Amino acid sequence: MSRIPTSLKDLFSGLETLLEVEDISQSSGFLQGIEPCTRLLALSSIIVSSLFASSFVQLSILYAPIPLLVVFSKAPLGGFIKRNLFVPLPAIALGVPAFFMTGGNMLWSAQLGPIFVSATIEGFQRLIIFAARLWVCYGCLSLLTLVSGIDGLLSTLTALKAPPLLVQLFSLTYRYIYLSVHECVRVLFAREARTIRQRRRLNFDSLRSLAGIASLLLLRSYDRGERVYLAMKARGFSLEATVDAPLRIRPRDLLFFLAVTVYSVLVVALVASRI
Amino acid sequence: MKAVKVSDVSFSYSQEVKALRSISFSVSSGESVGLVGPNGAGKSTLLLLLAGLLQPEKGHVEVFGVSTSTRGFSETRRRIGVVFQDPDDQLFNSTVLGDVIYAPVNVGVPRKEAEALAYEALLAVNALHLKDRRPHRLSFGEKRRVAIATALVLKPDLLILDEPTANLDSVSRLELMDLLRRLNLGGTTVVVSTHDMDALSGIVNRVIMMDAGCIVGGGDLREVLADEVLLATVGMKPPDIVRLYLMLREIGLSRGPVYSVEEAYDDLKTRLKPLS
C-alpha cells in the first residue's frame, strides 16, 4: 500500500496489493534460492536467539543482517522498513506496565490520589528490550513471508512433517483470502458504480455501509467457496491429498543455515560475556 | 460402451427448488452431446451430477459403468474433465501453472511429469505464454482457456463443459469450437451445456433439450436445429443461417435447411455459379 486508504475501495485494493507479495517470492533473489525448509529454520534460529538476548546491543546486532537479506533478496527495502516501523508502537503499548512495575533506580514518580506511581530506569530498559525483541521477531517473519510463496510454505510445512490436515487448512485459508478479497472488491465496485456523491473518507456512513457489505460478502464468499470446493473436488482434491514437497538440501543451503545459526548463537554468547 | 448413463434422476436444492425431475438418458463413448434449454432448466446441476460432484436424491448416475455414489468413483473422476461456467470458480492458485498442475499433483503424478502434462494442456488451448501469470489478472477469454487447460491436463475420456463459449470473443469462440471438435474426433466424449446454438452445430451431433428440470425433447442435431416449434418450447431459436434457409424454403427458394456457414457457402456457390 503506497498511501493511507481514503475510501473503502482504496482499503480493499490495498489489501489485494498486500496479497501480491508472492511476486517478490518468485524473483531470483538470494533467499529465494535457498531451500524453503532451510530458510525457515535459519530465520527461526535468529528468533530463538532473540529470546535469549538480554541487551539492546545484542538485539540490534541480531537485527542487522535482516535488512541486508532483504536487499540481497531483491525485496523493496523501503516497504520492508515501513512495515517494521509499525512494530515499536504496539510493542511499547504492550510493554508499558513493565516500565512502572519493575523495581530499581527511580526515574520518575507521582502520587495520583491514593496510588503512588513510579517508573524506573530498569523498567525503561526492560520496555526497550521487549520492543526490540518483538522487532527482531517481526523482521524475521516479515522477511520470511516476503521471500516464501504459498507453495514454498506448504512444501516446508509438509517437509517438516506438519499434520496433512493443517497443511490443507492452511492452503485453503490462503485461497479463500484471495476469493474473499476479490468478492469484496467486486461488491465495492458495484456500489461505487451506483454512488453519485463520491465519499472520500472512512466515516460513520461508510463504516455502516461496510457492515452491510460484510454480511453480504459472507454469503457471497460462502457461495463462491462452495463452487470452488466443487472445482477442487473435480480435480482430485481430498483431505488425504498430499502437497508435492521435494526436500533437496544443497551445500549452499546448509552453509546458509550454519552461518545464520552460528552468527545468532555467537551474538548471544559473546556479546553477553562482554556486557 | 456407455460413457454416461442417467437413470430416473431427481435432484433438488431445497423443498421449493426442484432442479431435476426424473431424468433419464445415456451418452455413448466418443459421442458429443449438447444440453440446451433456458436459464434454470437444470443443465448445470445435471453436469455436476455427471461429474459426481453432487449426488442424486433419486435414481442413479453411472459414468464409464461406475456409479457416482460409490466410494471408488474418485478413481473414475480422473477420467473426467470439468469446465465450470465461471472460470473464477475454477482458478484458485497463485499462478496459471500452479492451477493447471493442481489435478495431476493431487492424483500423485510426479512433479516433472505433471509439469509436462500442464505444458501440453496449455499449448492445446494456446495459453502456454500465460503459465507464470496470476489467474485473477487474466482477461475473461484467457481465464476460460486456462480453465479448459485445467480440465484437459489429465487427458480425460469424458469432457463436461458448462457454457464454454459464453462471453468469448468470436476468434476465441471459433478456436474453442475447433479444439472441442478435434478432441471429440480423437475419441473424447463431450457433454456440453450451452445457449449458443451457433456453437452447437460445430461441436455436437446430438442434442438433449431441457426445461424446468425435465427433458422435453432432443435427437439428431440437424433435426432439432430445423425444428423451430420444438426449439420455441424451450425459448430458443435456430442459428441465424438455419433460420435464413428455413425462410428461403418457405418461399420456395431453397430445398432444405443448411446448418453452417460453410454449408451455405457451398450451396450458394453451386447455385450462383451458372448465373455468373
Image (cartoon, rainbow, N blue to C red):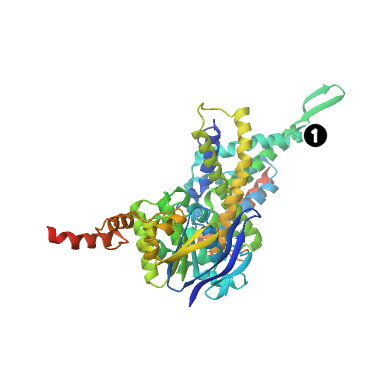
Figure disc tally: 1
Chain of the residue that carries numbered disc 1 in the rendered image: A
Name the residue located 63 percent from the left edge and 56 percent from the top edge: A169
Q: Is residue A26 above or below residue B178?
A: above
Q: Which residue is mark 1?
A: A101
SS state under label 1: helix
Identify which amino acid the numbered label 1 is placed on.
Met
Image position, residue B181 (x, y; %): 37, 66
Image position, residue A103 (x, y; %): 81, 34
Image position, residue B176 (x, y; %): 37, 59
In this view, the residue in front, B92 or A156, is B92
In this view, the residue in front, A80 or A212, is A212
Q: Is residue A79 above or below residue B41?
A: above
Left or right of B189 in this view: B61: right
Question: The C terminus of chain A appears in which quarter of the rendering?
Answer: top right
Image position, residue A94 (x, y; %): 72, 37
Q: What is the crowding at mark 1: few (fewer than 14 residues within 10 Å), some, or many (at least 20)?
A: some
Task: Give the farthest residue toward the right.
Answer: A114
Left or right of B34 in this view: B61: right
Visible in this render: residue A75?
yes
In this view, the residue in front, B239 or B54, is B239
Task: Give the farthest residue toward the front.
Answer: B251
Task: Tell me which corner region of the image, top left, top right, bottom left or bottom right, holds residue A233.
Answer: bottom right
Visible in this render: residue B131?
no
